[in-house]
Image (cartoon, rainbow, N blue to C red):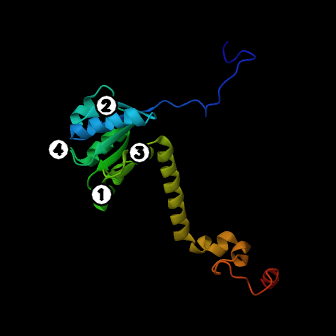
């Protein structure tokens, strides 16, 4: 029975599991690549490791490349800069999450400016790394970054629009903010709206 025939049922798209994220791992230490691949295989069904590489040329020559996401070490012993690697992956349609032993602001900024979706320390537990790499989290980050940028623009153009009394109106003036918890007010709350 096809889905167009009367009486057939279709499963809502929300309950159908999406295809696993095609993942590539790039680190110049084979032990790290193998360990991460095994961890993702055993513990993260939302991902399928389809490419493993210990240098840049091995990754881009892999028949499975491009992939949806590349977990890439910042410092790889080859002559290709991190910015070039990130831009090449992005041009091929892959998102990049940089994983590094260095956790300094300059390295983070270089990677994000080049187009990396994120930059995380190698001290991060694998469970958290897997969570950060999900499409849902990437979407959340994009939405939050857009919201933050919009608020910055609003603040630069008209800062008074972001003041609490503007955002919350009467609730801000009539609330019990800044009063010690458990302490009773010394006036009738109904008096405040009449005064304002």
Residue at 30% x, 50% y: name it.
122
Which mark's residue is nearer the viewer, 1 or 3?
3
Going from N to C along the chain, the mark reached first, 4 or 3, is 4
Q: Position of residue 85 (x, y in %)?
A: 28, 43
Residue topped by disc 1: 103
In the foreground, 184 or 194? 184
Q: Secondary structure at mark 2?
A: strand
Cα–Cα gap, marks 2 and 1: 25 Å
Going from N to C along the chain, the mark reached first, 1 or 3, is 1
Residue topped by disc 4: 77
Quadrant assignment for the N terminus: top right
Cα–Cα gap, marks 1 and 3: 19 Å
Q: Position of residue 61 (x, y in %)?
A: 25, 29
Going from N to C along the chain, the mark reached first, 2 or 4, is 2
Q: Which picture quadrant has residue 88?
A: top left
Residue topped by disc 2: 51
Going from N to C along the chain, the mark reached first, 4 or 1, is 4
Q: Position of residue 57 (x, y in %)?
A: 22, 34
Label 2 CA crowd tier, 10 Å (few <14, some 14–19, many 20+): many
Q: Secondary structure at mark 4?
A: loop
Residue at 61% x, 71% y: name it.
161
Cα–Cα gap, marks 2 and 3: 20 Å
């Amino acid at each position: 029975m096809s889905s167009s025939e009367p009486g057939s049922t279709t499963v809502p798209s929300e309950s159908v599991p999406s295809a696993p994220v095609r993942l590539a791992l790039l680190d110049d230490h084979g032990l790290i690549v193998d360990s991460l691949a095994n961890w993702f295989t055993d513990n993260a069904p939302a991902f399928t490791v389809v490419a493993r590489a210990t240098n840049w040329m091995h990754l881009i020559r892999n028949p499975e490349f491009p992939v949806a996401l590349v977990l890439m070490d910042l410092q790889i012993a080859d002559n290709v800069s991190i910015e070039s690697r990130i831009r090449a992956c992005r041009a091929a349609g892959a998102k990049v999450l940089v994983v590094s032993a260095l956790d300094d602001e300059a390295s983070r900024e270089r990677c994000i400016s080049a187009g990396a979706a994120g930059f995380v320390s190698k001290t991060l537990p694998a469970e958290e790394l897997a969570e950060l790499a999900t499409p849902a989290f990437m979407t959340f980050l994009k939405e939050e970054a857009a919201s933050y940028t919009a608020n910055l623009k609003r603040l630069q153009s008209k800062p008074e629009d972001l003041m609490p009394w503007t955002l919350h109106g009467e609730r801000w003036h009539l609330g019990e903010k800044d009063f010690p918890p458990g302490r009773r007010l010394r006036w009738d709350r109904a008096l405040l709206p009449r005064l304002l």
